[in-house]
Amino acid sequence: MSAAATNSRMTLPPLPKSVAPLPPIQKRTTSHGTAHDLWKHFQERPLDAIFRPKSVALIGASEKEGSVGRTILWNLLSSPFGGTIYPVNNNPRNPHKSIFGIKSYQRMQEIPEQDPIDLAIIAVPARVVKSVMQDCVEVGVKGAIIISAGFKETGEEGAKLEKEILDIARRGHIRVVGPNCLGVMNPIGGLNATFATHIAKPGNVAFISQSGAMCTSILDWSLQANVGFSSFVSIGSMADINWGDIIYYLGDDPKTKAIAIYMETIGDARSFMSAASEVAFTKPIIVIKPGRTEQAAAAAASHTGSLAGSDDVLDAAFKRCGVLRVNKIREVFEIVELLGKQPLPRGNSLAVVTNAGGPGVISTDALIGSGGQLACLGDDTMAKLNDLLPSHWSHSNPIDILGDATPDTYARSVELAAMDPACHGVLVILTPQSMTDPSKTARGIAEVAKKVGGAKPILASWMGGQGVTEGREILDEAGVVTYDYPDSAAEMFTYMWKYSLNISHLYETPRWCAEMRPDQAVDVIIANAQSEGRTKLTE
């Protein structure tokens, strides 16, 4: 992404006297990337102070074993981000003039004026945060991460304190992540502004979560699974920076190829939908949103201090703005990998090629249950399969090519299925039998994938353990994603189709209903709420 600014101004024709002149055009950075860059790439990016700071002040820094302040400072030192660190401990009883050998300060104002602070990390009790934020404004801090909890999630008093802190931050033009969060990581830049035990590995997927505990769990899993991230963000209660802010920022980040979100509450729905609708054109946005049941929604509200929206409304909103919603944590990363390696299907009809009947039945259940369907193969395809396969093959989809199928039989069957116009994708299932050669079969499927040329997605399930490992590696190198179990693969195909469908919705204009009376609808909603004794409306 180029940071060079264009200095030329647009020449406009004379305006009629009745029309006020346009304001001067703002200076933007030159971009050769995605379409939304044209409107969003201003030269100044406020969130750079949080994700790419040149200097960091840690308020609440400590050497006390087991403290959050000690952990964050150690993380900042252990993963050099190329900037300066200023430990601040405002406890008057603290006798130390240095922490971990670094000069410490009792207040932000003591830091030399010639050293501007980009990012302040605040890890002090909630009652002290207000005065710390005032100090941040006085010294010109640009961005802040409030680690501290004890705000709106605790009740009215906490909400009032949070608002007062936010008002102070806004007067100083400080953007704030949190409160009640784990912090922010930029693994590519080396920044670990969190109290997690490790920094994430560098990668091209950004992960954002309202739950700090979910962040640490995903982080621990990712280190074992060798999954990397471009950014790793615990967004907390979203007092200031919300989903829309982060999505817009990551949408403009060339290192981020996909955005994965763990969302408990949507917050500013308009901001989210606006940002998602724009960024989803070029980068997949995958959301796991718990709270489908009333009990789970109540748990989310107690955790974040925000109301949970109607699940049906959220589903419709996600579909409309190009966001794919998944139900399980593992599916977030599986679909991100799949979308990065295989083309989107143009429909939901799948052909299943298998050397065993049972896995074909299981994958069919998963496919139909998740919203897909089996492809109805044409007469020409069926005739060619009859010529290729033994007489007692299944003669239907799933295409059971039997346990003694050779690698060549596998490859030809998959190719015939992929070439059928009614088929939008192919799932290849292999079970290890005495006549099966998993590695050679994988090489044949890899060649077919090249022939198909990215026109249709090809997924695979090489079932088994050590005996099929080499075959999985061959397929992975060829860009064919493999799964341990065929039902997971079938569900992933359906997710791909749903994502494709959601993206197509972005190009549609909502249909206006002449009978629609918004004022009447509002009256009904309010009347229903009053009849239930409620004084608040959900999102």
Image (spheres, rainbow, N blue to C red):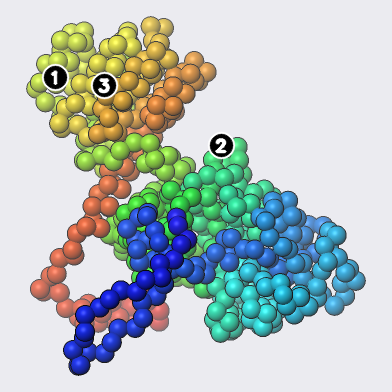
Of labels 1 and 3, earlier in sequence is 1
Residue at image mark 1: 382
Relative to 424, is 31 above or below? below
Disc 1 residue crowd, few under 14, some 14–19, many 20+, Cα 10 Å: some
Q: Is residue 144 left or right of residue 19?
A: right
Look at label 2 and name its amino acid.
Answer: Ala
Query: CA–CA distance between discs 1 and 3?
Result: 13 Å
Q: Which of these two is toward me, 345 or 175?
A: 175
Q: Which mark lies nearer to you, 1 or 3?
A: 3
Query: CA–CA distance between discs 2 and 1?
Result: 41 Å
Q: Are marks 3 and 2 in contact (CB under 8 Å)?
A: no
Quarter of the image where the C terminus is located:
bottom left
Residue for point 64% across, 68% down: 119
Residue at image mark 3: 414
In this view of the protein, can residue 470 be seen by the observer? yes
Look at label 1 and name its amino acid.
Answer: Met
Of labels 2 and 1, earlier in sequence is 2
Residue 169 falls in which quadrant of the image?
Answer: bottom right
Q: Which of these two is toward me, 426 or 329?
A: 426
Q: Are marks 2 and 1 in contact (CB under 8 Å)?
A: no
Task: Tell me the SS state at disc 1.
Answer: helix
In this view of the protein, can residue 293 be seen by the observer? no
Quarter of the image where the N terminus is located:
bottom left
